[in-house]
Image (cartoon, rainbow, N blue to C red):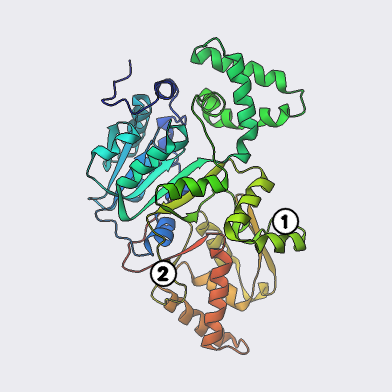
Amino acid sequence: MAEELQSENYLAEVRNQYEHLPYPYRDPAQEKDRLVKTVGDALPFLNHYAFGGRQQYDDFRVLVAGGGTGDATLFLAEQLKAFPKAKVVHLDMSTASIAVAKERAEMRGLSNIEFRHASLLDVTESDEEYDLINCSGVLHHLADPDAGLRALKSVLKPEGVINLMVYGYYGRQMIYRMQEILRDLNYDGADIHTQIERAKMAFEAIKPTSWGPLAYQLMQIETQHHGDHGLFDMFLHSQDRAYTMPQLYEFVENADLQIINWNNGNLPYSVWTQADWIANPELRAHIAGMPERQRQAVTEKMLGNMMKHMCLIAHRTPETPSPEDAEMVPEFAYYMQGHIQKYANALTPLEDGKQVKTQIASLEFNWIITPFTRVLTQHILTSPSIGDLLETCYTLLWDEGVPGLTRSLMQQKWLEYYAQWHQHQLLYLRHPSSPAITIR
């Protein structure tokens, strides 16, 4: 029997689901072979967009609110291992989920995690405040998501940040259609096992219909990764709401917080800023010229596949580091560093003028090799600062006899290079006083 919570700040049916089917499904034995990386919790990314590139981690405090089986908790704890006083608090109402997370942490030898069995709404009872709060896929399962966000805000430090994920309305319409069907089929109050078996039969039944193949494919993808745990969480959840883009802004701002950055997983950031997914140049320019929130709202509707909204929210919008600050250290996203190293090893003057296609998940874009992009790529991973990088590149290009070379031109080409990668959230900046975080 599951351990009783001291408060009643939870929905009994939701808790029962996660006691029987901890989510996401994880096998602790796999910790020997892999670390699940939750992209929005990469500290170099957060340092740039939330902490001005100057965050110190000696006494860093993290709350993973609704931590489930531990993906975000373990990723953050691994990054903070070098800082003995840093702490990650893993909070969840499901003892079964906590047990999985604990076993995974033990497999990794992590000792910087504190596990708490409690409701997210109970955080207000503590006087502890946090630099970072991860709340991914949780608030939309509360009876009152607004109360949940207010509770998190109450324990967020004045300069802290919340990494938030809630469901997207338009991208989940097929899911909600299937949820409605399954609610009808389970009118008799069937138990969890029966609901799962009926869902599998229902998916087989709808395959010949006009919309069935897409729904079936969605189910297959989820069950391939998470089995019955995923099937139930996506299609049989008893408490599930989603947000349109305007509703998301309202949700965040009603808590007196601000959206400071987007982190929509595999969705390229330029989708929001440039409408570069639209082929027609006239329509693309029209949408790109819309006010930001209007552009985001129409983009969400037109794409129709945004199942999640992932963003950083804070008390105020912080100042982000500038690529014109010579002291700053450039850092590529951890999943980009291997690509850059590959290019750095391969590029020679013979490649100048060629076009390179780069693909990261669903993001694909082209860039031209010039003497400037070549030397910047070759030395950016090893340079201790922007100033050092530009001096090194300038000297090399001077020795090559690049025509028209000036320090001003070198600076201009660096800013263009930085913008090319930064617009896709692939290149960040860190002050040398802020410790480098290694992610493998």
Identify which residue is drawn at 48% across, 58% down: 333
Q: Position of residue 60 (x, y in %)?
A: 28, 52
Q: Position of residue 10 (x, y in %)?
A: 37, 27
Position of residue 417 relative to residue 435, above or below, is below
Judge left or right: residue 366 versus residue 88: right
Identify which residue is drawn at 65% across, 16% down: 201
- Between the C-alphas of marks 1 and 2, the distance is 34 Å
Judge left or right: residue 413 versus residue 165: right
Judge left or right: residue 314 versus residue 401: left
Going by the numbered disc 2, the residue's amino acid type is: Val
1 vs 2, front mark:
1
Q: Position of residue 389 (x, y in %)?
A: 46, 76
The numbered disc on residue 402 is: none
> Label 2 neighbourhood size at 10 Å, few (<14), some (14-19), many (20+)?
many
Q: Can you tell which quarter of the image residue 187 is in?
A: top right
Going by the numbered disc 1, the residue's amino acid type is: Ile
Q: Which residue is mark 2?
A: 329
Q: Which residue is mark 1?
A: 278
Chain-order first, disc 1 or disc 2 = 1
